[in-house]
Amino acid sequence: MSERLSEIRARIESVRQLGQVFSALRGLAATRAQTARDQLIAVDAYARTIAVAIGRALALATAQPEPARGDAQTGLVVFVAEQGFAGAFSERVFAALGPSLAMGELFLVGARGAQLATQRGVKPFWTGAAASHGAGAPKLAERIAQKLFVRIAAQKIVRLDVVYTSWSGQRRFEVIRRRLFPLDPELFASRANGEPPLVQLAPEILLRGLTADYLHAQLCQAALHSFAAENQARMEAMAAARRQVDDKLNNLQADERRIRQAEITEEIIELSAGGL
């Protein structure tokens, strides 16, 4: 029985250490999620500024976009989980996309999610690691944009959408799909209020440059939203794991008390029998 007791005590210590790991991971995820949400304030303001400039540039532009080649496809930039312990974060994105996940050119961002996509038989056109911290989102967006510009310039992509997960509070995760290219004039029409801008570039050239800036801003925005949501999902997964650890710990401690009580009872019986 003493061997059984020492075994349970060893398991209790192991479970306690596991609980400490879960708590540490939860705290780290919470810090990262909050930092990313704070950084989104500046990125959102930047994206709005670019959108206003595009609205005014569209009012000046007269040239129509060149027709796309017949072999052009729809491009999808999809942000999924970079690391594990995030619950069904990537699966939620894949479920929202459905059959369109295997259509067109897929640019998949997130190492862990890319592994899951491979298991599903999905073959992305390009895969890359997501940002490891919020401050890395602009560089990640630039890296993705460079890949996209090559395909757009070669007229291999006729339309480009970005898909990412946003967390809106109260345990609500929303998978968002947003059009990036070509620009939707109606989306920017309401932003073209005010006096016509003074420009030194041809409106078409100005619009082309603003479109590139807008694409970068939207990718940066999506990267930060996904980063914050992934860490929020990880925080909730670790909280659930910690609750399971606490339940397991309570059960083990109850077993420890029962075995210890049984040992004490056995010792008392032996001492009583020896005194007779």
Image: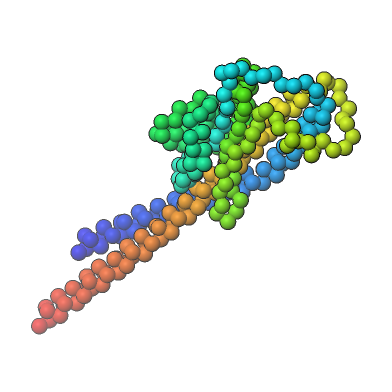
Q: Residue at x 12, y 79 (%)?
A: 273
Left or right placement of residue 212 versus residue 59 in this view: left
Q: Is residue 76 above or below residue 165?
A: above
Q: Nearer the viewer, residue 218 or 266?
A: 218
Residue 141 pos. (x, y %):
62, 31
- Image quadrant assignment for residue 205: top right
Judging depth in this view, the residue of 126 and 112 nearest the camera is: 126
Residue 64 falls left or right of residue 129: right
Q: Residue at x 21, y 60 (%)?
A: 3
Residue at the (58%, 56%) spot, across then down? 170
Observer able to see residue 138: no
Q: Where does the N terminus fall, quadrant-wise?
A: bottom left
Q: Is the residue 209 above or below the residue 35 in the image? A: above
Q: Which quadrant, please, contains the C terminus?
A: bottom left
Look at the picture and state if 231 lies above or below 214: below
Residue, far left: 276
- Residue 123, position as x, y percentages in the image: 45, 27
Given the current orientation, which residue lies at the most extreme bottom position?
276
Task: Name the side, left or right, on which 43 lies relative to 71.
Answer: right
- Where residue 184 sits, quadrant-wise, is top right
Residue at point 50% right, 52% down?
Answer: 236
Q: Position of residue 122 (x, y in %)?
A: 44, 30
Q: Nearer the viewer, residue 246 or 59?
A: 59
Quadrant housing residue 52: top right
Q: Position of residue 144 (x, y in %)?
A: 60, 27
Nearer to us in this view, 13 or 48: 48
